[in-house]
Amino acid sequence: MPWNDRVMMRLLRVAIGAALFASAAPVRSADHAGALITTGELRTHVETLAADSLEGREAGRRGGQAAGAYILSELKRLAVRPAGDDGSFVQDFNGQYRNILALIAGSDERLAREIVVVGAHYDHVGYGNKANSYGPFGQIHNGADDNASGTAALLELIEAFADSEAKPKRTLLFAFWDAEEKGLLGSEHWISHPTVPNASIAFAFNFDMLGRLRDRNVEVYGVRTAAGLRRLVSERNTGTDLMLTFDWTQRDDSDHWSFYKRRIPYLMLHTGLHNEYHRPSDDVNLINVEGLRDVTTFCERTIAAVADSPSTWTFRSTCSSETNDTDKRLSTPQAQPPSRLGVRWDDAAGGRGEFLLTTVTNGSPAEAAGLHVGDRIIAVDGVAPADTAAFRRAVLSAVKEVGLTVTREELTREMPVRLAGDRVRVGMTWRLDDAEPGVVILRGVVVGSAAHAAGLQVGDRILKVTGRSFADDAAFREAFTAAEPSPELTVERQGRLWTTKIDLDAPAEPMP
């Protein structure tokens, strides 16, 4: 089919501008949009794009052109506007390649001028060669995961947004990039010759290889390119319950790189490399279609949140110097505080509610009080701890002194011990991060403390206290204090949100 000529930007500006006078759109329904993303349609898209008849979708070849024709046929049945050359869906470049572009105008009079680009490359490597395949060469590389899966997701996302009565506030530009496998040529050409004013590009999404979800894990890149992205992404994971790995690396091997180089915030989602990557074996039978639906639904919610955000998405320059090593260094657990008592015990005995001492540290409060190896502690301040956790908690939370009930050679005695250090009532320390405003990140959790009993771990993000958000450290402390003695925390761990209560005044539980 013939390709169209270059862009006339006036037409697109008119298309975007038409939204500025629209009445306020109704509230979006995530359930409605999610229902439009189906495993049946995703499977059909992947099977079509990864069929042998498309010969591996190499850019500029007949298979790549056939893939483009299929995408165009799908777009023409949807309520989206062309955003390519001269009012068409196509942007030609380099004489043989073509990006395919569609637009859904934003609903907000002010924010509709800003563009959120949502893209995925639709080409693959054809029959493969030494430069682009791990072999064997000369066989059709169908690229079911790379990137028929991302292309299928993009088609379903367009349908979900197009069919929704309520449109996002910012304008969405959907881009099917060509010639990504030849060096990001399609996205690089578009960003250099945009079909929208370059300054209006607020954000970019890139979906590359979404079809091999394993252990519910999704890799998320770009989360450091603008403040607040990790929280936004995690809060949209409710319901899909994916496990998110937030990677701080700025990878240069997919189309988000074209935007990152120009200081445009982005998110790139990826379900991970596998042995079939750039091999003929990357075929449809290995696609996790149910997982692809979950990831696509999660993408829809995240796109809507970015497009509807009242705040401007400002690029964080410092993200370029932040790596996974930086993350690892910042996430190193703080050392546990010195023991207040100075003993070790047999854990097996502790499980029975008595604590057979195996070590009494020289110079410790336990030694000063006269405790010996072989003593059995059976109560703290008159209460028999149910287990090791309760015993630790009783010692940590005591103000200055505890009374231990000890058996030695079948005799029981009461032994007061003046403890070292300060009382540990909560048992957690935290840090702040300018990339994660309104969040405290745990640096230390004292074993046996109230925080430890609540299930908190180093690296957990606290987002709310008893349903209340906070802006900074002072506001967090204020909210925490106001909620005592049992503050309920909303916590994010690996992109999953959960709640827990810290019971600050819980006594050591007695033996049943």
Image: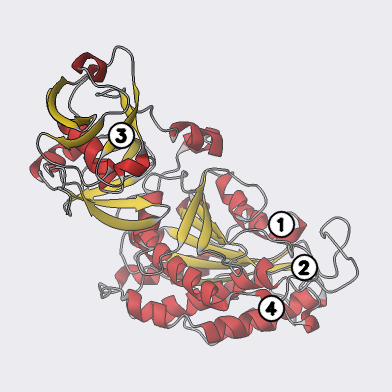
**From this viewpoint, is residue 479 visible?**
yes
Mark 2 or mark 3: name the one nearer the start of the chain.
2
The image shows residue 472, relative to residue 400, as above or below, that is: below
Mark number displayed over residue 185: 1
| Foreground residue among 4 and 128 | 128
The kind of secondary structure element at disc 2 is loop
C-alpha gap between disc 4 and disc 1? 26 Å
The image shows residue 97, relative to residue 313, as above or below, that is: below
Mark number displayed over residue 284: 4
| Foreground residue among 60 and 361 | 361
What residue is at 28 percent from the left and 22 percent from the top? 372
C-alpha gap between disc 2 and disc 1? 10 Å
Mark 3 or mark 1: name the one nearer the start of the chain.
1
What kind of colouring is applied to the model shown? Answer: secondary structure
Q: Residues within 10 Å of mark 1 (few under 14, many from 20)?
A: many
What residue does disc 3 label?
356
Q: Amino acid at mark 1?
A: Leu
C-alpha gap between disc 2 and disc 3? 72 Å
Position in image of residue 132 (x %, y %) = 82, 58
Query: Which mark lies nearer to you, 3 or 1?
Result: 3
